[in-house]
Image: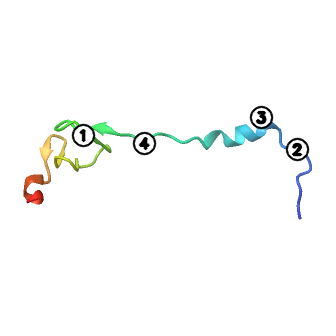
Amino acid sequence: MAVPFRKVSKTRKRMRRAHNALTAKTVTSCPNCGEMIKPHRVCPNCGYYKKEEVVNMKKDAE
């Protein structure tokens, strides 16, 4: 089985792992109701997208 010839230094190991950091999910507030939503999606709370009603939520709730 292959074994590394030399020890990998802390600096080289950390440089390799520099791109492994987690990033927070992007959320924006709905301009109609203020609910936090993913960008470029219809608001699941009120059914609006870009200040236009796309889904009639009152009709769906009944």
Mark 2 → mark 4, Cα distance in angstroms? 37 Å
> Hey, which quadrant is residue 62 in on the image?
bottom left
Q: What kind of element bears circle 2?
A: loop
User: What residue is shown with label 2?
Assistant: 7
Q: Is residue 30 above or below residue 53?
A: above
Disc number placed over residue 11 in the picture, else none: 3
Mark 4 → mark 1, Cα distance in angstroms? 15 Å
Q: Callout 4, which amino acid?
A: Lys
> Which residue corresponds to the image point at 92% horizontal and 50% vertical from the top-left?
5
The numbered mark, 4 or 3, whose residue comes first in the sequence reads 3
- Looking at this view, is 1 or 34 the one in front? 34
> Which residue corresponds to the image point at 46% horizontal and 39% vertical from the top-left?
24
User: What residue is shown with label 1?
Assistant: 35
> Which residue corresponds to the image point at 22% horizontal and 36% vertical from the top-left?
34
> Hey, which quadrant is residue 3 in on the image?
bottom right
User: What residue is shown with label 4?
Assistant: 25
The numbered mark, 2 or 4, whose residue comes first in the sequence reads 2
- Give percent across and percent down for residue 49: 19, 45
The residue carrying pointer 3 sits among few (fewer than 14), some (14 to 19) or many (20 or more) residues within 10 Å by Cα, namely few
Q: What kind of element bears circle 1?
A: loop
- Give percent across and percent down for residue 27: 35, 40
Mark 1 → mark 2, Cα distance in angstroms? 51 Å
Name the quarter where the N terminus is drawn: bottom right
Q: Which residue lies furthest to the front in this view?
A: 62
The numbered mark, 4 or 1, whose residue comes first in the sequence reads 4
